[in-house]
Image: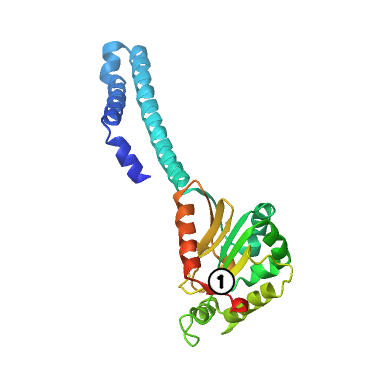
C-alpha cells in the first residue's frame, strides 16, 4: 500500500488536489482566529472558517479513499492476471469437497506428488470410471531417484517425520492397485515415475489447478494450497512444468 500511495501522491493532479485542500484548511483556521472574529464578527468568522475547514478535511479524506481504492484495484488486477481464485490452508482430504465438485464432470486430470496415498485411498474406486470418461496422467516420485540409497523419497520421509521407506511403499502400492484394475482403459489412465526433484504438489482438473509447496517438517496435507484458473499466467507455467516432467518420467512399475 505504501508504494501505491507514493505513486499516486506524486502525480501532478494529486499534488494540486492535496495542496489546495491543505491550503483551504489553513485558511479556515486563520478565519477562526480571534483577530478575524474581531474584524468580521464572531458569527461570520465561525461560519466561513468552519465551512473552509470542513471542505479541506473532506477533500483530504476523499483523496485517501481514492488512494486506498487504487491500491485495492492494483491488487485485484494482479490476482486476475495470475488467475488466482482461492487459497486454502490445507490440501488433500481437508478440501476434498472442492475436488469432488470438479471431478464429477472432469475430462482432463493431471496429478503430481510423492506417494499420493491419501488420493489412492479416497479415489481408487473411481479410477476405472475416470479412465472411460477422462484423460488421466499421474506422476509419482521415482522411489529410487537418484539412487536407491540416497533417494529423494527417503529425504522426504525424514522431512515429514515418516518411517524410512514409507514413501517408496506408497508408490509401489499405488502402482500395484492401478496395475490390478482389469477394466481400466489404460491408454486414458497412465501412471509414471517422476525422475526429478519435486518442487510443488499439483492437481489439475480441466481448466483449474490446485497447487502448493512442500514445506519442511509438515505433512503434505497440512500445507497451503492455491487454486488458479486457465485465464492467468500461473496455470500456463504450472502446466508447462507438468508437461516437462511427464516427458522426462519413466513408466510405472507395472508397465516395466
User: Disc 1 on helix, strand or loop?
Assistant: strand
Task: Decide: is 156 above or below 122.
Answer: below
Residue, disc 1: 192
Q: Point out the image quarter for the N terminus.
A: top left
Q: Is residue 181 left or right of residue 221?
A: right
The answer to whether residue 50 is above or below residue 184 is above
* Residue 116 percent coordinates (x, y): 61, 70
Kindly identify the residue that appears in the image at 71 percent across and 75 percent down. 180
Residue 214 placement, left or right of 29: right
Q: Residue furthest front?
A: 187
- The answer to whether residue 51 of the structure is visible from this angle is yes
To which quarter of the image does residue 181 belong? bottom right
Question: What colour scheme was applied to this rendering of the protein?
Answer: rainbow
Quarter residue 143 falls in: bottom right
Q: Quadrant of residue 15?
A: top left
Give the camera-side residue of 146 and 178: 178
Amino acid at each position: 500500500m505504501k508504494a501505491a500511495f507514493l505513486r499516486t501522491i506524486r502525480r501532478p493532479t494529486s499534488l494540486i488536489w492535496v495542496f489546495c485542500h491543505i491550503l483551504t484548511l489553513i485558511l479556515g483556521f486563520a478565519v477562526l482566529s480571534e483577530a478575524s472574529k474581531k474584524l468580521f464578527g464572531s458569527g461570520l468568522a465561525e461560519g466561513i472558517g468552519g465551512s473552509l475547514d470542513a471542505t479541506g478535511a473532506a477533500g483530504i479524506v476523499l483523496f485517501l479513499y481514492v488512494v486506498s481504492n487504487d491500491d485495492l484495484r492494483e491488487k485485484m488486477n494482479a490476482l486476475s492476471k495470475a488467475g488466482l481464485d482461492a487459497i486454502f490452508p490445507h490440501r488433500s482430504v481437508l478440501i476434498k469437497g472442492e475436488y469432488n465438485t470438479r471431478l464429477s464432470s472432469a475430462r482432463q486430470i493431471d496429478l503430481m506428488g510423492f506417494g499420493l496415498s491419501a488420493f489412492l485411498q479416497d479415489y481408487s474406486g473411481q479410477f476405472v470410471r475416470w479412465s472411460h470418461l477422462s484423460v488421466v496422467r499421474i506422476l509419482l516420485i521415482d522411489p529410487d531417484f537418484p539412487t536407491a540409497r540416497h533417494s529423494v523419497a527417503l529425504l522426504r520421509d525424514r522431512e515429514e517425520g515418516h518411517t524410512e521407506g514409507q514413501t517408496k511403499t506408497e508408490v509401489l502400492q499405488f502402482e500395484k492397485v492401478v496395475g490390478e484394475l482389469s477394466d481400466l482403459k489404460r491408454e486414458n489412465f497412465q501412471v509414471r515415475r517422476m525422475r526429478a526433484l519435486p518442487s510443488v504438489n499439483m492437481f489439475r482438473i480441466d481448466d483449474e489447478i490446485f497447487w502448493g509447496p512442500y514445506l519442511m517438517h509438515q505433512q503434505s496435507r497440512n500445507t497451503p494450497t492455491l487454486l488458479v484458473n486457465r485465464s492467468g499466467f500461473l496455470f500456463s507455467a504450472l502446466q508447462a512444468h507438468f508437461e516437462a516432467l511427464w516427458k522426462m518420467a519413466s513408466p510405472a512399475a507395472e508397465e516395466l
